[in-house]
Image: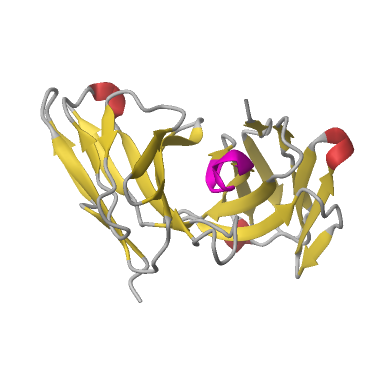
Amino acid sequence: NAGVTQTPKFQVLKTGQSMTLQCAQDMNHEYMSWYRQDPGMGLRLIHYSVGAGITDQGEVPNGYNVSRSTTEDFPLRLLSAAPSQTSVYFCASSYSRRSATNEKLFFGSGTQLSVL
Amino acid sequence: AQKVTQAQTEISVVEKEDVTLDCVYETRDTTYYLFWYKQPPSGELVFLIRRNSFDEQNEISGRYSWNFQKSTSSFNFTITASQVVDSAVYFCALSDPNTGGFKTIFGAGTRLFVKA
């Protein structure tokens, strides 16, 4: 059971480049989210989705786009990368609310992104 | 708005000492969930505990214990007889019930150093 899979693990971009961070889960979780982790700031929520076709903004959504066309996938897009987006990104998912609400978040292994 | 405050940025203890990590939260909701996660030096995020806002019973799991007090909006975490393997960043988190409880906000984290 793969759980939550994030790719790539490392990425270096130049300012202005675009890229997509991939996230996939095989646990049939309805809820998926993206966080960024910066020193001294903990994990900050970028965007989240409570089901296919439904997304919403978190605490720090600017500069990022998401879509949720399937239950399994929740990609995060940087349209024009900026140095301020240098961070470690984590994707997370959680159980269907039909089964048990507020269970723990399952995290991917993270993507270390550097924007030069 | 919801908020989680972990005032202790770093704590350093000697092995076998007890250590308490503080967490104070803010929410206007009457139903919510509180969590603790651990991030060891390897970088993955590990779930430790979930607490329902209606359940104020303290919990003990081995060397770990949690003290939840709604009156002070605190959810503190104590490690008894700390070990070097406890060295990690610990995050307290709060869920938002308005999204079915899945939108989770994290504190800035407390970095714990346990010296041999």
Q: Quick check: A73 above or below B1?
A: below
| Whole-percent x, y for residue B77 in the image | 74, 50
Which residue is found at the position 33% from the left and 23% from the top? A62
| Whole-percent x, y for residue B31 in the image | 73, 44
Q: Quick check: A70 above or below B3?
A: below
| Whole-percent x, y for residue A33 in the image | 40, 46
Q: Nearer the viewer, residue A6 or B61?
A: A6
Q: Can the viewer see residue A37?
A: no
Q: How many numbered marks are there?
A: 0
The verdict on residue B101 being magenta is yes
Quarter of the figure that contains the N terminus of chain B? top right
Q: Quick check: A64 above or below B32?
A: above
The verdict on residue A78 being magenta is no
Which residue is found at the position 33% from the left and 35% from the top? A87
Left-right relation of A75 to B49: left
Please provide the residue range marked out in magenta: B96-104
Quarter assignment of residue B17: bottom right
Q: Nearer the viewer, residue B30 or B18?
A: B30
Q: Can the viewer see residue B85?
A: yes
Left-right relation of B99 to A5: right
Residue extending furthest bottom?
A1
Q: Nearer the viewer, residue B109 or B14?
A: B109
Task: Report the coloring of the rendering.
Answer: secondary structure
Q: Quick check: B61 above or below B106?
A: below
Quarter assignment of residue A12: top left
Left-right relation of A43 to A116: right
Which residue is found at the position 41% from the left and 27% from the top? A60
| Whole-percent x, y for residue B21 in the image | 72, 44
Which residue is found at the position 56% from the left and 39% from the top? B106
Quarter of the figure that contains the C terminus of chain B? bottom right
